[in-house]
Amino acid sequence: MSVKFTYFVTMRIKIIAILCFLQFGIVFSQINEDLICAEKNRIINRIQKRGISNIHHGFEINYHRCHWYLNPIKNAYLKGRVLFQFRVVDKEDSLGFDLISGLKINSISYHGTNMAFSRKGDAVYVKKVGGWQSNDQDSFEVDYEGFPANNNGFGAFIYDNHKTGPVIHTLSEPYGALSWWPCKQTLHDKIDSIDIYVHTDKSLKAGSNGLLVETMQEGDTNHIYHWKHRYPIVTYLVAMVVTNYDEFTQYAHLVGRTDSLPVLNYVFPQFTASAYKEIQQVLPQIRLFDSLFVRYPFVKEKYGHAQFTWGGGMEHQTMSFMVNFSFDLMAHELAHQWFGDMVTCGTWRDLWLNEGFATYLTCLAFEYLKGPESAKDRLRGMRNDITGDPNGAVCPADTSQVNVLFNGRLTYNKGAWVLHQLRKTIGDSAFFAGCRNYLSGANAYGFGNTAGLKYYMEQASGKNLAVYFQRWFYGEGFPYLKINWKQRGSKVSVSVEQTPSNMMVPIWYIKVPMLFKNKTQSQLFVWEPQNLKENYEIELPFSADTAIFDPNVTVLAKASVGGINVDLIQQEEIVIAPNPGRDVASVFCRNSNMTKIQIFNSVGQDIFSVDYGNEAQKFVDLNTSKWSTGAYIIRIYAGNLVYSKKWLKY
Ligand SMILES: [Zn+2]
């Protein structure tokens, strides 16, 4: 789904990138472009072929009992029986459900007799003699079979091989459920309760949602895995996976509970030893999210992982399917149990409430479990990704355009940054209270939307957040800031000039934090400009040689900072400021003019030079935004003299 997703990680990742469902992305230079393209194409293909259900269902689903018969040792053939129990909404002659036309329906049984049905594309309509009355509680059972469509080998029902065995897994988000089972494919109605019986070869295990109730022998060669889930679940999160798994359980100790939450793991046998070690990292993550937000939503059942071969992870309710068990991917899929599963996006336009939150909770896992600096690094990496393009809003302009809907830069990264900036604007206590109320209020175990999140954040903070949500959800782009400062004695004058990156937003109301410092002292100032250009005069009780924009990484903007301390300049012939710096290095020459500047990297290679010829300069701003971090030597030619100065990019 998403297109390009940049994860900022500090370690080289061996396998494919970390792809969370519908997010392709990775680690700076380690992007595996081929993989990304392949993943993107397969998803686009699937979504475009499936389209969006526009069936009139006419009922509210209460319960499913699903029997699925499959044996990946043989092939990808699926037989199934799915019981629907439902409440009829209004008086109806016929009711509809979704099932891809390529799967054959053997019968639809209605209290022991066969029921008439008709099919139109992926819609199936059942007809009852005399029709239904509103509020009727009723049921029918669909018996079907076939090879689920998988778009030339890829799709919602995937038949594959890992190194030591064949595997079948499902992955229905967003529109793929109907590809393999008869269902009500919608974002408006959760299934209240479900039983899943997977009939398969007895050498294999089947993972699914909820609790494993029992395994039963079936003939000589098969057994049945019976899973039961008693929490509301949206259709696309119902899933199963079958292969020759190893299994182990670990336990998360949640604050305020004497018992522990089982974390059940199904892993490919060749990865058992490494997975056992890696998955231990999810235990403090569960404890963290459980304490920061609300109780783990499915605490009466389990959390778990099942390994699969798809290039990422998918947050299937109570059992995430995972390509590997990296800290990031586990945090992201776990986070979805609250944001995405317990409260599901109410429309695909609100997808950032799943993906932005899961991306941000991964940052929180870094902040709380690996240290604040690691979270800042991650947020800086995401901010670079977001500001790499001047356009784009968190709200997708058109949900039928897959690249727009599942855009890693916008739905994931910008969504996460909008949450982070909100937290820094209203404070931790209001932010986390707002999140808790969003999860436990009217949306609990249902569907959420952006207006609902705004409501809970306003309640918790006591602030009117209309402008914030309006601009950051709908608005395209972000602010560019040009900040200049000049210190003379204890007085510092600062100018802050904003240029919105996209004309759609005339001005962004953001905070502008600036840290002025020298080797021993520092002081932070925070302004909230109300105009595109503002000037500030401040008193600084020490002589600054550097000013840094947003040292704590709290503002979504791209800034360039140039400055000068006149007192320092008067002492030195050449001054480069700020040093260390980031996007701009301003070079000043006190007594003469510069005829040439030459830049060398840390290994002495000449990477850049500029000759001013007859237009010798006293003051030059070097744009260093594209330089990689590290030390540089800046050589300045002025008159008959040559100066070399070390400059550090951070
Ligand atoms: Zn996700």
Image (tube, rainbow, N blue to C red):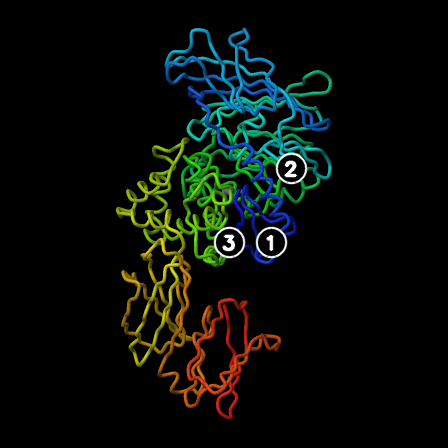
Circle nearer the N terminus (3, 2)? 2
Q: Is 347 displayed left or right of 67 in the figure?
A: left
Circle nearer the N terminus (1, 2)? 1
**x and y percent of residue 72 in the render?**
69, 28
Alpha-carbon span between mark 1 and mark 2: 26 Å
Circle 2 sits in a helix, a strand or a loop, which is it?
strand
Q: Tell me whether the residue at label 3 lies in contact with that at label 1, contact meaning CB atoms closer than 8 angstroms.
A: no
Q: Name the residue under label 2.
A: 267
Marker disc for residue 31: 1
Badge 3 crowding class, 10 Å Cα cut-off, few under 14, some 14 to 19, many 20 or more, is few
Alpha-carbon span between mark 3 and mark 1: 24 Å
Q: Which of marks 1 and 2 is in front?
A: 1
Badge 1 crowding class, 10 Å Cα cut-off, few under 14, some 14 to 19, many 20 or more, is some
Front residue of this view, candidates 2 and 6: 2
Q: Does 487 appear above or below 101?
A: below
**x and y percent of residue 124 in the render?**
52, 19
Please give the name of the residue rendered at 70% of the width and 36% of the height, measured from the top-left corner.
161
Circle nearer the N terminus (3, 1)? 1
Decide if ligand 1 comes within 8 Å of the CB at mark 2. no
Q: Mark 3 points at which residue?
A: 370
Residue 221 location, quadrant: top right
Specify the amino acid type for callout 1. Answer: Ile
